[in-house]
Amino acid sequence: MNKILKNMLTENLTIKIISIALAVFLWFFVTFKGQTETSLEVPLEFKNTPSEMEVLKQSVKKISVSISARERILREITQNDIRVIVDLSNVKLGENSIPITKSSVKLPRGIDILRIDPSVVKVYLDKKEQKTVPIKAIIVGNPQKGFVVSSLEINPASITIEGAKRELDRIRVIKTEPIDIEGIKGDLNIQAKIDPEGKIFRTDKDTVYLTVKIRRK
């Protein structure tokens, strides 16, 4: 019995080895056929930010993620399908160096991550604060000849803003977008947007109401 089994295993050994090698080659060919690489710039998202802290700045806003997948999958994928999420649950005030690993990247099945760049992000956190600041209306132009602005009312006259302490310390007043009164000769009631002027803060008011009263000279 052992002799028969030995003959079965050794008979046509070369052909059997070639067949196994061919099968392995075909498996690799089928598995990796159509595999394509590409890179995407993915915005950073933060989660679990401590309630008393605020992200002041970060070393980068986007992460380059190199991926590999079948061409069909890559054709159908959108920017929103891939996310890079940074967990801030263990951060401290000031500078934090946070590694970006494969577990930080959320993506559909069938996609492999090849590279992540950069692999470490520096995130700076500050105390979260609120403050109330006055609104300043920006008026441009002049009323019609013979008329002048008699008064200017702003409602609300101030708003509460929230953000990182260092950023809020820079803010003394919030301006409106320019309001053009060129050539008017009667009172003007208008809703005006506030102008952040590049400052970073949050507020539940993005507009105010202005009443520009006009009288004859």
Image (cartoon, helix red, strand yellow):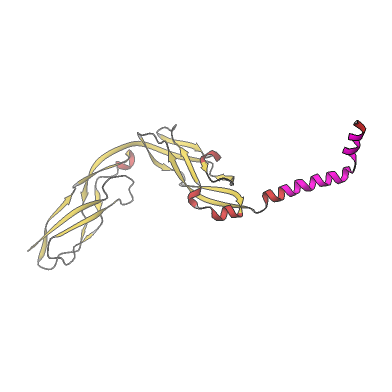
Residue at 54%, 38% in the rendered image: 103
Closest to the observer, 36 or 152? 36
Query: Is residue 202 placed above or below 145 in the rendered structure?
Result: above
Left of 89 or right of it: where is 110?
right
Q: Is residue 90 left or right of residue 24?
A: left
Q: Position of residue 43 (x, y in %)?
A: 46, 47
Q: Which residues are magenta?
A: 4-27
Q: Quadrant of the N terminus?
A: top right
Locate residue 123, reporting x and y percent: 44, 39
Q: Residue furthest right?
A: 3
Between 152 and 35, the residue placed more toward the observer is: 35
Question: How many marks can you see?
Answer: 0
110 versus 145 height, above or below = above
Question: Residue drawn 33% across and 37% down?
Answer: 128
Q: Nearer the viewer, residue 4 or 95?
A: 4
Q: Is residue 44 magenta?
A: no
Q: Residue at x 68, y 48 (%)?
A: 31
Residue 121: horizontal and vertical position, in percent? Answer: 49, 41
Quadrant for the C terminus, please: bottom left
Q: Main secondary structure of the magenta part?
A: helix
The residue lying furthest to the left in this view is: 217
Q: Nearer the viewer, residue 27 or 142?
A: 27
Q: Is residue 13 magenta?
A: yes
